[in-house]
Amino acid sequence: MNIDSNLILADNVRRLMEAGGETQAKVAKRAGLSQRNVGNVVTYGKTHETSPTVRTVDGLAAAFGVPAWMLFIQDVPLEVLTGQRLNQVIQDYIAVPEQGRTNIERVANAEVRYAGLPAGGLAAKAG
């Protein structure tokens, strides 16, 4: 499976902009970037294939108040992307010992089954 992370980033930034009714100029100002940098991210794959720098991704993440890594999650619901719960779950997962991680995974797998999704959740459903 060959996934272009830049397309995922572009989609998530576009969705965040639309949800907030924001323009490229407004986001650029908050991110400390040029409008062109923001435009290059949201139009990636349509008019060009220039990958953004880490500085650009970090600026966008700061502008939207999310960790940079979350901008690269494919098909993430907007409420998950804009909320803090996923980041907290990840931080908790990292902080606990191996048995705790096993328990978190067991609960997550049970919730996926309860929701009627295939093993692997949305990633398996999309694939």
Image (cartoon, rainbow, N blue to C red):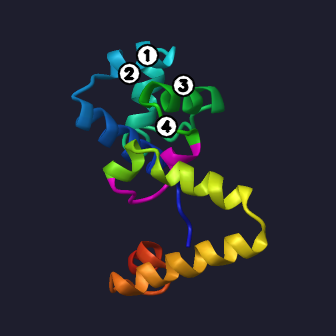
Where residue 59 sits, quadrant-wise, is: top right
* Mark found first going from the N terminus, 4 or 1: 1
What's the distance in space between the residues labelled 2 and 3, CA to CA? 9 Å
63 to the left or right of 68:
left
Q: Is residue 33 above or below residue 115?
A: above
Q: Secondary structure at mark 3?
A: helix
| Quadrant of the drawing holding the N terminus | bottom right
Amino acid on which the number 2 mark rests in the picture: Val
Q: Secondary structure at mark 2?
A: helix
The answer to whether the residue labelled 4 contacts the one labelled 3, judged by CB atoms less than 8 Å apart, is no
Residue topped by disc 1: 30
Q: Residues within 10 Å of mark 3 (few under 14, many from 20)?
A: many
* Mark found first going from the N terminus, 2 or 3: 2
* Mark found first going from the N terminus, 2 or 4: 2
What's the distance in space between the residues labelled 4 and 1, CA to CA? 13 Å
Q: Is residue 75 magenta?
A: yes
Q: Is residue 31 above or below residue 86?
A: above
Q: Is residue 89 above or below residue 113?
A: above
Residue topped by disc 2: 27
Q: Is residue 111 above or below residue 96?
A: below
Residue 38 placement (x, y as % from top left): 43, 26
Identify the mark at residue 14; answer none if there is no mark.
none
Callout count: 4
Nearer the camera: disc 2 or disc 4: 4
Residue topped by disc 3: 59
Identify the mark at residue 66; answer none if there is no mark.
4
The answer to whether the residue labelled 2 contacts the one labelled 4, judged by CB atoms less than 8 Å apart, is no
Give the residue displayed 47% in from the left and 84% down from the top.
110
Amino acid on which the number 1 mark rests in the picture: Arg
Nearer the camera: disc 4 or disc 3: 4
